[in-house]
Image: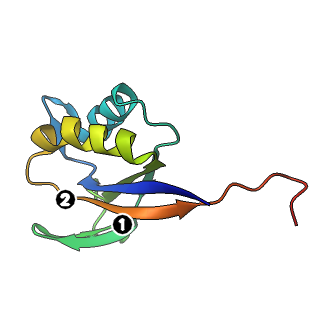
Amino acid sequence: MQNAMFLRIYLTESDRISGEPAMQAVLDECREAGLKGVTVMRGIEGMGLHGVHTSSFLSLSSDLPLVVEAIDDVEKITRAVEILRPKIGPRLLATWPVSVMRFSEGDS
């Protein structure tokens, strides 16, 4: 097992950073910090400071929740947080330590 850190950032589809979609801005900054394997997931429903965001047929929302996640070395995640924190404003960013295990095809 290897020690690493988990990074999660909560956004919505309508969030913008410096005029561009927040998701793209966050991915660009993660790349700049040297992170690998960053994933963005689109939620079907969420609730936050600004109410409920839902994909319900009746609401036809274009402001669904997005979650950006990455797992990497502690140093790389720390660097990414230093770069991201001033740019993401009031959006929620969380980190926590994780243990990483990588299995190859032949492992049982």
- Determine if residue 58 is in view: no
Q: Residue at x 86, y 60 (%)?
A: 107
Assign the C terminus to one quadrant of the image: bottom right
Q: Nearer the viewer, residue 107 or 43?
A: 107
Q: Nearer the viewer, residue 44 or 2?
A: 2
Q: Residues within 10 Å of mark 2 (few under 14, many from 20)?
A: few
Q: Look at label 2 and name its amino acid.
A: Leu
Q: Which residue in the protein does label 1 denote? A: 55
Q: Position of residue 67 (x, y in %)?
A: 36, 56
Query: In the picture, residue 76 is in which quadrant?
Result: top left
- Could you say whether the residue bearing mark 2 is in a helix, strand or loop? loop
Q: Earlier in the sequence, mark 1 or mark 2?
A: 1
Q: Is residue 20 left or right of residue 56?
A: left
Tell me: residue 100, above or below residue 70. below
Q: Position of residue 86 (x, y in %)?
A: 10, 39
Q: Position of residue 42 (x, y in %)?
A: 41, 56
Q: Residues within 10 Å of mark 1 (few under 14, many from 20)?
A: some
Q: Nearer the viewer, mark 1 or mark 2?
A: 2
Tell me: residue 31, above or below residue 99. above
Q: Is residue 92 left or right of residue 64?
A: left
Q: Position of residue 94 (x, y in %)?
A: 27, 60
Q: Which residue in the protein does label 2 denote? A: 92
**Residue furthest right in the image:** 106
CB atoms of marks 1 and 2 within 8 Å: no
Q: Look at label 1 and name its amino acid.
A: Ser
- Could you say whether the residue bearing mark 1 is in a helix, strand or loop? loop
Assign the N terminus to one quadrant of the image: bottom right
Q: Residue at x 25, y 54 (%)?
A: 12
Query: In the picture, residue 64 is in which quadrant?
Result: bottom left
